[in-house]
Amino acid sequence: MTTKHARSSTPVPSDTHPVGHVSECAPPPSARLANSRRSAVDIQFLPGAQFDLDGLTVELSHCLSLDRLVVRDLKSGHTWVTTRTELRPIDTPPPESPTDRGPALENVTERQLEQLKEREEALRPYLHGKELSGVDAQRLARKLGVTGRTVRRWLHRYRRYGDATELLPRPPGVRRGQLALDPAVDAIIRHAIAPKLRESGNCSVRSVYELIRGDCQAIGKAAPAKSTVLARIKSLNRNPEAVPAEVGRQLRDQTRLVRGSAEAMKALARVEIDHTLADTHIVDARDRGPLGRPWLTIAIDVFTRVILGFILTLESPSRLSVALCLRHAIFPKEAWLKQIGAVGPWPMFGRPNCIYTDNGPEFRSPSFRMGCKRQRIENDWRPVRTPRYGGTVERLIGTFMRRMRLIPGNTFNEILGKRSPYPAQQAVLTLEDLERWITNEVTAYHNERHTSLRMSPLAAWEAAWQTPRGVVVPPHPVDRHTLFTDLLPHAERVVKPAGIELHTLHYRSEALAPYINPGVKRVVRYDPRDISSVSLELPTGGHLQVPWSKQGWPRMSLWEWDEIRSRERRRDDLASAEVVRQCLAANEALIGQRIAEGQLRARRRRARAERWRQGEVVPEVLPELTQAAAGNAHRPPRKPRQRVPKPALMLPPLPKNQLEVSRASIDSPVPFEVLE
């Protein structure tokens, strides 16, 4: 950083060590070359120097003391006293061509250092304000063996940058960053290359050279060489703005500063989990036929770099593979090691405090997150499309994939530097064999020195559990089945009187009776490897195992059941389909016939109503009425029916005795009772 001066553009010299001055106590030029590119002119607190004071440009008048200064505002002319700490230097703009500032320092020779010292001694009187006359310039030119213009150019660069290396001899030719090509031709080249790169991210000289040559001839310029066009293509295809968005994002990632991966402060504080497709093929145990490449899910503790667990499966990554990997990582492994016949101990286990993963659906699924909450495990995810944030597990996967190249059936040949030809035909290991191989490699990895730890992961794990009171055993859950069930996939179902329906299967148990409630959905977890039973989460905690109603069926996986259902849907029964089609066609014909008959009767009623209103018969009203009238023309006309009035309703006469009583009752107010 440097200051500008009101009376001269030349920096004011310092009282102690002027800019560019090599004093007796100053280091020699060779000792200052390492920092010369980063050096700048010193801040000079001398009269005439300009500074920034709270947004105002002020000029230093004189110094009252080492801390109190008198300054003057250049715009208003006001003068006041301020402190040295309140003044800020005015930044100078960067050089116009920072790449054109002398040769590379690693290529400087002893002879060039001698020339540098000689030139600096000759120009020292003129570095700090003394004008270089023409006579002096010619004298120095003869002394240094150059022209007077070169001497003035050296002095100008030295004053501008304050860098002694500006006096070093520069290599001949075009400077780096400068263009020797005509600007119009360069614009034509870039205009022809840019569309190709934006469309596909690739461009060849052959695809654009004829277009470039035609445009150059149109403006009367010579066509560039093909090597020049190739150089422009190479310079543009590294520009993230000139290529497709996805390619540009990857280019930015290659040049972006990577901040170190997040470190943990203790063991099991942060565990990273990720999947990868193994770089080797496997065979089946019975026929030794190729099965393909299995998926590896692995968990690593960030603090100690120990591998807590892994799982191999032929299925794509899912919530099941994550649950199996976590169960393998959390619980002790002595019985499992004895079962598979692995060599060496694997004493790493324990419940992690936080699981750090990518944004795969198996890690973002509500069932996995809810299961982790029930087990008091926190979830954390990387930013989207940033695998560098999971560098610990990514480097571990790379290490094990490189070790897998020693297995027959590997997918990469290091000698050829490309993928192995026909790797499946050379595979010899089964899934169980590969599991045992990885276990042995994990044991070896734990006992090898780790570069970042400066000790083996096993030693770091043991040291992490050492306390002043002794060794602490890592905690882990009591029930292995409960933890595994909490991490399994789940579905919400209603418990009905008929049981639970899931995947078109019915599950029943007498123990479901207290939980039957058609208005409440409950969480049902299932193991895709065995769907013969499901686990119902109880409101009070725990799980209820419910078997399916198909008592005679063998156990099967969800993938087998889906295949059976798909096969049934694809089954094509032509006879049944033809019968159904005929029945549907007959029903449609029946409905159409009845609709037509109803429409005919409606038309007839409308025709009769119209004739009645007009008082005459109109044969042309409807063809049906005309045909009916023609068919009935030979019949004699009917006589009008005579209506006979119905007689009035006659009541039967009363008996004589009842009639006399009625008359007597009129004349006598005495009540009486009629007896039959």
Image: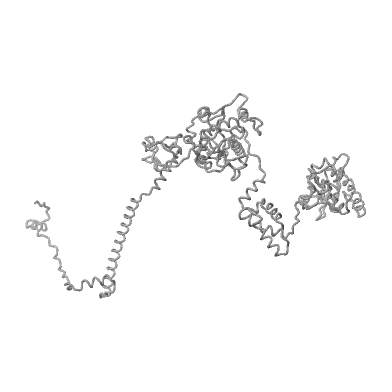
Residue 419 is drawn in which quadrant?
Answer: top right
Q: Position of residue 544 (x, y in %)?
A: 42, 35
Residue 66 is drawn in which quadrant?
Answer: top right
Q: Quick one: which residue is furthest to the left in this view?
A: 656
Relative depth, front residue between 198 and 301: 198
Q: Position of residue 123 (x, y in %)?
A: 88, 48
Q: Is 150 above or below relative to 106?
A: below
How many numbered circles does the render carry? 0
Q: Is 230 above or below relative to 109?
A: below
Relative depth, front residue between 344 and 262: 344
Q: Position of residue 515 (x, y in %)?
A: 40, 38
Q: Is residue 314 left or right of residue 630?
A: right
Q: How is the image coloured?
A: one colour
Q: Position of residue 331 (x, y in %)?
A: 52, 30
Relative depth, front residue between 545 and 457: 457
Q: Is 126 above or below relative to 294?
A: below
Q: Is residue 123 left or right of residue 361?
A: right
Q: Is residue 393 left or right of residue 10?
A: left
Relative depth, front residue between 676 and 26: 26
Q: Is 479 above or below relative to 585?
A: above
Residue 612 is drawn in which quadrant?
Answer: bottom left
